[in-house]
């Protein structure tokens, strides 16, 4: 049986170009040259991960931002 699950993707610009994509619910991390590539790679890697380690339902994640003070050196 297959079911559709909505997960979170965090995309960060990579220093060498492209994007790093992270799924915080599973810890899966991938890369891609574009946002679309990074998401496609993350989707595939997460599907493979979930075949081995089923996801426990814990409700929807809360996504927010926060600020910190950074002192110049």
Image (cartoon, rainbow, N blue to C red):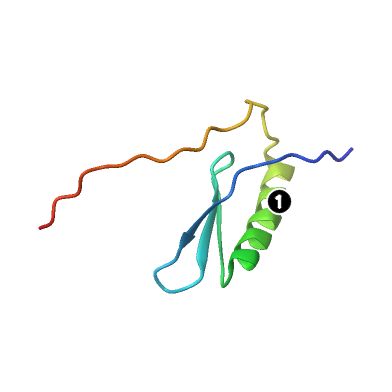
Q: Quadrant of the C terminus?
A: bottom left
Q: Residue at x 60, y 44 (%)?
A: 8
Out of 11 and 57, give the one closest to the viewer.
11
Location of residue 60 in the rendering, given as x and y in whole percent from the top left corner: 62, 30
The residue furthest left is: 73
Q: Residue at x 41, y 41 (%)?
A: 65
Location of residue 69 in the rendering, given as x and y in whole percent from the top left corner: 21, 44
The residue furthest right is: 1
Q: Is residue 54 above or below residue 42?
A: above
With 53 as the anchor, is 22 left or right in this view? left
Q: Residue at x 64, y 67 (%)?
A: 37
Crowding at label 1, few (<14), some or many (≥20) Cα neighbours within 10 Å?
A: few
Q: Is residue 4 above or below residue 37?
A: above
Out of 66 and 20, give the one closest to the viewer.
66
With 1 as the anchor, is 46 left or right in this view? left
Quarter of the image for residue 54 reads top right
Query: What is the count of numbered marks?
Result: 1
Disc 1, SS: helix
With 16 as the anchor, is 63 left or right in this view? right
Quarter of the image for residue 21 reads bottom right
Location of residue 14 in the rendering, given as x and y in whole percent from the top left corner: 44, 66
Location of residue 23 in the rendering, given as x and y in whole percent from the top left corner: 57, 47
Q: Quadrant of the N terminus?
A: top right
Q: Residue at x 39, y 69 (%)?
A: 15
- Please name the residue that numbered disc 1 is placed on: 48
């Amino acid at each position: 049986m297959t079911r559709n699950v909505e997960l979170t993707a965090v995309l960060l610009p990579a220093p060498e170009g492209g994007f790093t994509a992270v799924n915080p619910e599973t810890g899966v991390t991938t890369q891609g040259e574009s946002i679309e590539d990074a998401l496609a790679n993350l989707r595939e890697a997460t599907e493979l991960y979930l075949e081995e380690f089923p996801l426990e339902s814990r409700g929807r994640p809360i996504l927010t931002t926060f600020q910190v003070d950074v002192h110049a050196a």
